[in-house]
Image (tube, grey):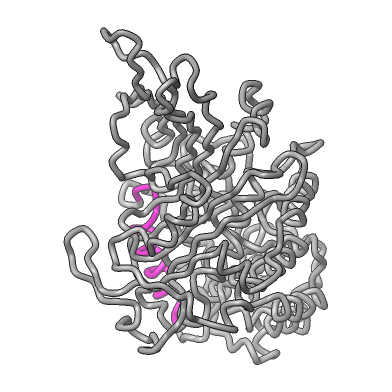
């Protein structure tokens, strides 16, 4: 056993991992299980059964898990003298997901593992599979008798959850034939990120923020999810999805909901998710294709350079249609029509092959009246509160202060709390938190069906308008911040995109907690 065990642990369970030979399992899930075990959140009462079509021995599977942990885990496995204890909890079974007999054999293996590790019949089914397989696999889980257990059963599924509202409804009905809504855990890994979860704390635990969190004091909110990478090996999937479905329908709308939600009455999952749903219901829907064109910008990257290295255009990427009209960038002006946020635009943008990898939320407060006191020349900078989600975690706020030695000259000062600088890079990964929450049965940071449906209802309006015409598809060179129209979206309202993490912040004096 490892020396220091924290008190909060998850109840013992068998984790049945479908898609155990895939990239998600290798990069995220195996390292997540290892970290939970190393930190005492998983006791010795657990088992993992890897499932995939590929033939593989138990020893080969153990080697795959070891290599995954060696490459991607936060903890150094080379210094772990008791790794053999951990890996003994892992089994592998080759499974044809269309073969019901195979699921009966799987049930026998599960019961064997439960007996070996003293488990009480709790079973977590993790489907790291293509969405079209969720329904058939769920049906065969039931047909194979795997739900016949004295413990609990839960289903974890990955995005994308459908292609539009119609397909999502069909997919949901298939799953709901087998699992109850409270047993379904739909992962949006952004909700597992430290600073995304910290938004609630910053908002609701600080008396000098919450009274200002409304349209009287905030002029706009900006959300940026930028990537430097292209489509990599996901060209086939991405060319069908695009930036809107890949990032907008889930990550971006979830972050809007977190920023705009009302305080929940209790810190319980359903109350928190109820408030997020209210925000999604308040989103102003685009009524016409013209309204979409006026408020939404879409773009596709062409050849350019990232950090001095030349990169191809999107249409030259592997498995991408050379005449593709799929967007790799979109920006939008979004309104939340309720009393708190009426008149406050939420500007969002996401894209591939942008200059900086960053996830950042900027809250821009209304400026001081022009022509008075220190704003006589109308050049006073507004105050900003910035949540840095990725890659550095932290918050900072920008205020105006007197420049030392000068006669009433002002200097912007950025006061910085760097979570990564204080805690270090060894903070829990999103998948660690979410896997742990799923085992505990805490659905707070998973998306409920009504959230999914409302998000699709919003983005379907945009997708429908784009289907009618692709004349508004703009291009941008890789390594730039997208089409010029993305800047104009804010400029029309008298605003601009603020710099994100990794860019030049301008003439700002930094006050930081970093050593």
Q: Compared with residue 89, is residue 268 higher up or lower down, i.e. above or below?
A: above
What residue lies at 60% left-to-right and 35% top-to-bottom?
Answer: 218
Residue 499, horizontal then vertical, whole percent: 37, 44
Residue 180, horizontal then vertical, whole percent: 82, 67
Q: Compared with residue 436, is residue 402 higher up or lower down, i.e. above or below?
A: above
Does the image show residue 44?
A: no
Task: Reply yes or no: does residue 381 show up in magenta.
Answer: no
Q: Compared with residue 148, is residue 488 higher up or lower down, i.e. above or below?
A: above
Residue 247, horizontal then vertical, whole percent: 53, 64
The majority secondary structure of the magenta stretch comes to: helix
Task: Reply yes or no: does residue 73 show up in magenta.
Answer: yes
Where on the picture, by quarter, is residue 108? bottom right
What residue lies at 36% left-to-right and 13% top-to-bottom?
Answer: 402
Q: Nearer the viewer, residue 45 or 41?
A: 41
Residue stretch rendered in magenta on the structure: 56-76
What residue lies at 54% left-to-right and 24% top-to-bottom?
Answer: 369
**Residue 492 in the figure: left or right of residue 74:** right
**Residue 101 in the figure: left or right of residue 384:** right
Q: Nearer the viewer, residue 378 or 433?
A: 378
What residue lies at 25% left-to-right and 76% top-to-bottom?
Answer: 312
């Amino acid at each position: 056993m490892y020396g220091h065990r924290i008190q909060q642990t998850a109840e013992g369970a068998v984790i049945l991992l479908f898609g155990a030979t895939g990239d998600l399992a290798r990069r995220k899930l195996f390292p997540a299980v290892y970290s939970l075990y190393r930190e005492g959140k998983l006791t010795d009462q657990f088992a993992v059964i890897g499932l995939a079509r590929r033939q593989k021995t138990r020893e080969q599977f153990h080697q795959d898990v070891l290599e995954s942990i060696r490459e991607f885990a936060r903890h150094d496995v080379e210094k772990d003298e008791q790794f053999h204890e951990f890996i003994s909890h892992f089994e592998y079974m080759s499974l044809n997901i269309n073969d019901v007999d195979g699921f009966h054999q799987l049930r026998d293996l599960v019961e064997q593992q439960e007996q070996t590790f003293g488990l009480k019949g709790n079973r977590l089914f993790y489907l790291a599979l293509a969405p079209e397989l969720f329904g058939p696999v769920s049906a065969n889980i039931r047909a194979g008798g795997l739900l016949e257990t004295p413990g609990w059963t839960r289903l974890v599924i990955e995005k994308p959850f459908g292609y539009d509202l119609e397909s999502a409804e069909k997919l949901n009905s298939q799953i709901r034939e087998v699992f109850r809504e409270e047993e379904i855990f739909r992962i949006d890994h952004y909700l597992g990120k430290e600073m995304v979860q910290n938004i609630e704390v910053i908002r609701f635990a600080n008396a000098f923020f919450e009274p200002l969190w409304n349209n009287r004091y905030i002029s706009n909110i900006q959300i940026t999810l930028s990537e430097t990478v292209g489509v990599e090996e996901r060209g086939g999937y991405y060319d069908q999805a695009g930036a809107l479905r890949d990032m907008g329908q889930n990550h971006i709308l979830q972050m809007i909901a977190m920023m705009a939600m009302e305080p929940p009455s209790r810190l319980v999952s359903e109350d928190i998710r109820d408030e997020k749903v209210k925000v999604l219901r308040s989103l102003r829907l685009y009524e016409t294709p013209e309204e979409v064109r006026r408020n939404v910008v879409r773009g596709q990257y062409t050849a350019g350079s990232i950090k001095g290295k030349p990169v191809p255009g999107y249409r030259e990427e592997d498995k991408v249609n050379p005449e593709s009209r799929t967007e790799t960038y979109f920006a939008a002006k979004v309104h939340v029509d309720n009393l708190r946020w009426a008149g406050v635009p939420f500007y969002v943008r996401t894209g591939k092959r942008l200059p900086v990898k960053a996830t950042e939320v900027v809250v821009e407060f209304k400026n001081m009246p022009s022509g008075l006191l220190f704003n006589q020349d109308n050049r006073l900078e507004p105050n900003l509160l910035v949540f840095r989600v990725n890659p550095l975690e932290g918050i900072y706020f920008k205020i105006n202060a007197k420049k030392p030695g000068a006669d009433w000259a002002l200097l912007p000062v950025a006061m910085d709390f760097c979570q990564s600088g204080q805690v270090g890079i060894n903070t829990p990964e999103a998948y660690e938190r979410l896997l742990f929450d799923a085992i505990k049965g805490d659905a707070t940071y998973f998306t409920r069906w009504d959230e999914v449906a409302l998000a699709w209802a919003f983005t379907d309006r945009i997708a429908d308008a784009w289907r009618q015409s692709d004349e508004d598809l703009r291009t941008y060179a890789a390594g730039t911040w997208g089409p010029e129209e993305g800047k104009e979206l804010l400029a029309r309202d008298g605003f601009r995109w603020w710099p994100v993490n990794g860019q030049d912040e301008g003439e700002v004096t930094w006050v930081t907690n970093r050593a």
